[in-house]
Amino acid sequence: MKVLEKTYKKINKDDIDFLKSIVGKDNVSQGEDIHEDFCHDELSSISHMPDVLVKIENTEQVSKIIKYSFNNNIPIVPRGSGTGLVGGAVAIYGGILMDMTKMNKIIELDEGNLTLTVEPGALLMDIAEYVEEYDLFYAPNPGEKSATIGGNISTNAGGMRALKYGVTRDHILGLEIVLPNGEILNLGGKVVKNTTGYSLIDLICGSEGTLAVVTKAILKLMPLPKKSLSLLVPFPNLDTAIGTVPEMLKSRITPTAIEFMERKVLESAEEYLGKKIPDNSDAAAYLLLTFDGNSSHAIEKEYEKAARVCIDNGAFDAYIVDTEERKETVWSARNTLLEAVKASTTEMDECDVVLPRTNITKFINYLEKIQEEVGTRIRSFGHAGDGNLHVYVLRDNLDEETWHKKLDKAFDLMYKKSLELEGLVSGEHGIGYAKKKFLINQYGKTYIDILKNIKNVFDPKNILNPGKIF
Amino acid sequence: MNIVVCIKQVPGTSEVNIDPETGNLLRSGIDSKMNPYDLFALETALRIKERKGGLIKVITMGPLHARDVIKEAYMMGADEGYLLSDKVFAGSDVLATSYTLSQGINKIKPFDLIICGKQTTDGDTAQVGPETAEFLNIPHIANVLNILKIRDNELIVEMDMPNTVEIAKINIPCLLTVDKDIYDPRLPSFLKKISTRDKKIEIFNFKDLRDKNKKKYGLDGSPTQVEKVFPPKVDKNKEKWTGDSRDLGEKIAKELKNLKFI
């Protein structure tokens, strides 16, 4: 990727010596010692090497390094596991990349307040495993379990339980942040209600590391639902499948998740896993619904109601996924879709628009047209229940130039359609670098000016994750 | 082809507690499910029926709530369900269970084929199938990986032996225990759940069986004495390795070999 025009101080030996004095020489790497993985995220289209990679171990180190960067005009980017999809954690101006994954402690479980205090590098899967031992759960459930909680906070990650439980922002009660001038600030706390002035927590959550660096988070926990069950519902086509979702919502049914999968996408997952979903119907699309609760009886009542709505709306049947073995078979396929689609092509890029749920079908149908018009393979799956789609444009055997031309065209058409259907640019992956253009297209000058002014209040020198969002 | 499938209700989770005094599983309050290995047996029966036609009868032994696994079998496509339930049967070991099942199966004759799962997830003996066949005086093959041919009077199957896979011919009627993954078990159907909601489940008590010698059933008919039951030790050691992907790959492969996983 071409280096952008923007003047920052170039890292020199003095800077390196300073960084080594703060974190120790073993935690500082430069040049070829930096693994190639650190120049991109999960999708490699946005790529740039940092000048220096620093492994952070505590808040004080963050504070000292960020203050130094501020005073010396050096760009600085915080990074978790690097599982993002929009280049949010890529150091596009070089400078310092702060690897936060060593700050991964679970600091405190407070059962009296139902909170978990964690460092930003704690992984979602470790948090889930830790709290489950206490019959508790942290509700947001993004597919990528090796993501850090810091990264999830930065993008306000959503995931597969958003329909019933909301997104990351709904489950963050407090934050410790480091401002670009090095000052450490505490926001919120172990409180459930909070109308104490503007909610800076909500602003930081979803700010993609552009306003401050999160160094600690107080998460809201909930009692772990004792039972859960999924329904795998085969439909003759995607239209009927997705068209059922608003009907389900009208019937006041609240599954924790309604995922949609097309047969052709599922086939990639089956090939990837070497295992088939046990269904011999002629389904071209599936809805995967999940219900949780504390009694089998209550769940049964709810899922039977949902199954009837599905069948009344054209489903062939509704398969009951009730045991660990059955959940493993079905959910391992769902959780592999991204990897499977990725493995089926040479390169891909993603659009994660979010639409009013009554408009998803129109958008999905339009994808078929784009596929024909642009001449690329397009695959999609996602959260039909909350309107957040994951649409992947696949490169396959296209040469570099044709690929970019076709990709740009496909993306322009998709975001234009999304706008027309009252959708928004990103449901859960954020804007990062890759989707800036579309955010700017969506909102007018006033909106973008407000964003810029907010950024300016926090980071007047624009050193913190510069070049992202707008 | 008339097929009998033996199924069993087992605890729904591997995290069960044991009564420290009696050594019995504490089953109250935990969910139950069909023994996962039996799903392969039932699926095998359903596939045979799809090709050859016939009738699938499922049979289980247990308390009255074991009816739930028969209902589940109905949701997958079984045609008839039978439950052997009586206090006399309580505390049965492998021998008494097999004998009781054989008595039950004798009541639902005729059959061409009996299919069992390889083993259960709670008892784990893998002996009930073959012993039932012995009581019924019919040939049997365990650990069947594949059914190659179905003829009017015989089957040709692949069976898994410790170091080889052998192809065997077996006369009908016979009993097979099938291995995991012979076919992917289908999921229970909501439509079938609705249509079989009131479907009959026939219950056989002790008095319904032909052999009325109580010494052959339950605790009295069980020569096995269990000295102690305890949950397996769970090892949850975690190690984190970092480094170059090539070195790590080699290290992982070496470690998996050491642990005898590959």
Image (cartoon, coloured by chain):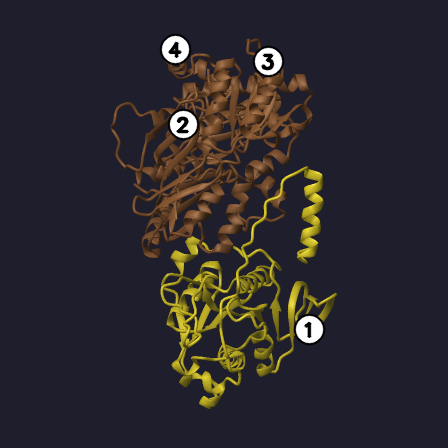
Chain colours: A brown, B yellow
Q: Which residue is mark 3?
A: A10
Q: Are marks 3 and 2 in contact (CB under 8 Å)?
A: no
Instruction: Look at the picture and state if B214 lies above or below A222.
Output: below
Of the numbered discs 4 and 3, the one sitting upstream in the chain is 3
Question: How packed is label 1: few (under 14 Cα within 10 Å), some, or many (20 or more)?
Answer: some
The local secondary structure at tag 3 comes to loop
Comparing B179 with B18, the one in front is B18
Is A468 left or right of A35, judged from the image as shown?
left
Of the numbered discs 4 and 2, the one sitting upstream in the chain is 2
Q: Which circle marks residue B227 in the picture?
A: none
Q: Which residue is mark 4?
A: A449
Gap in angstroms between the C-alphas marked 3 and 2: 26 Å
The local secondary structure at tag 2 comes to strand
Q: Nearer the viewer, mark 4 or mark 2?
A: 2
Question: How packed is label 3: few (under 14 Cα within 10 Å), some, or many (20 or more)?
Answer: few
Q: Which circle marks residue B170 in the picture?
A: 1
Gap in angstroms between the C-alphas marked 4 and 2: 24 Å
Instruction: Look at the picture and state if A311 lies above or below A65.
Output: below
